[in-house]
Image (cartoon, rainbow, N blue to C red):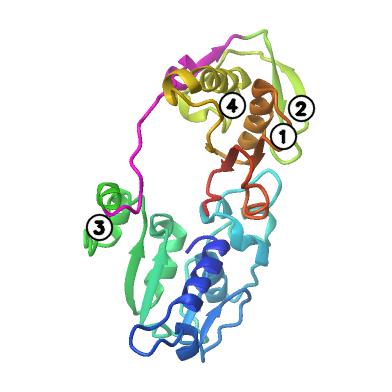
Amino acid sequence: MDRGNLGDQTLKEFQQYASPYNNFKFTEEYFVRRLTSNTLDKTARVCICTIQRMYAKLKNRELPEDLDEVSPDKLIHPSPNGRGAGGEGNLFAKPELIEYNPQIPIETFDIIVTDECHRSTYNLWAQVLEYFDAYLIGLTATPSKQTFGFFNQNLVMEYNHEMAVADGVNVNYDVYRIRTQITETGSKVESGYSVQIMARDTRKKRWEQLDDDFSHDPNQLDRDVVAPDQIRKIIQTYRDKLFTEIFPGRSWVPKTLIFAKDDAHAENIVEIVREEFGKDNDFAQKITYRSYGSMTCAPICILPSKQTR
């Protein structure tokens, strides 16, 4: 798995699972250990660990516990606030090849189950999985071509959305798409105009005049480029069409979940939603792994990317 919160969920599932044969809980029959340090308990029959922590173990390096909550793809790229490749003693700044570690032999595990395997089967992280001589099982809801390639196209089981709807596990959905010119084709700011520059870590803003034309494509939107008017137009359209086209006949704002690209994007959405709906702070709130549970009563929740529960 790639996030510590997924490890907590996994541990709870093991603790709650009861055998159909003797009604014992799994953790009553087998010792299950959630690893939060570099100590590997060899008496544990099941070890739950993030892939970044296992990498640190194999390299005999310490990993701060809070980095269990940082997405692996962000760890191997420098971040403006230093929480990533640049700020952790170069553990991820210049990824090194994994060599044999006698403290963790390759036969340590018989079976390895990797959750969110589409994030752990490439580059640095693939080394961790390939280090061990064990059966490998990958779980993901969003497999890529690289994921299938890593597992040699060996798809053991598939449970798609249509099957889940038929089983009553998921509900079906309708698509209502709101298009804007910027999201479709990008935008261009001509030289001579002043643009606002914001630091990602401090959100401090400054104005800078462009010496050259600046163009961006749709993929850069809300990552490298922020266009508040584009966010505002989407929210305004949602608000105005909510009771006429999206949910005709309703008179209340339904539970709404907005997925943001990162934390800064989520903050921008929260601010604009509150302004456009004319509501207080309780109406729209940002959910993270630290705040989840205390904000679920808000009609509109904004979820930064990779904060999935």
- Which residue bears the numbered disc 2? 205
Task: Write the residue at 49% across / 69% down.
Answer: 10
Going by the numbered disc 3, the residue's amino acid type is Glu
On residue 225, which mark appears?
4
- Which residue bears the numbered disc 1? 199
Q: Using the numbered discs, state the Cα–Cα distance from disc 4 to disc 2 in whole angstroms.
A: 13 Å
Bounds of the magenta segment:
167-190
Q: Is residue 46 above or below residue 126?
A: below
- Which residue bears the numbered disc 3? 158
Please name whichever residue, 251 or 309, is drawn nearer the observer in this view of the structure: 251
Going by the numbered disc 4, the residue's amino acid type is Val
Residue 209 lies in quadrant: top right
Please name whichever residue, 255 or 204, is drawn nearer the observer in this view of the structure: 255
Q: Single out the mark in the foreground, 3 or 4.
A: 3
* Element type where label 3 sits in the image: loop
Tell me which label, 3 or 4, sits earlier in the chain.
Answer: 3
Give how far across and how far down residue 270 sits, in percent.
65, 33
Task: Write the residue at 56% across / 33% down.
Answer: 223
Contact between marks 1 and 2 (CB within 8 A): the answer is yes
Give how far across and how far down residue 129 sits, in percent.
40, 69
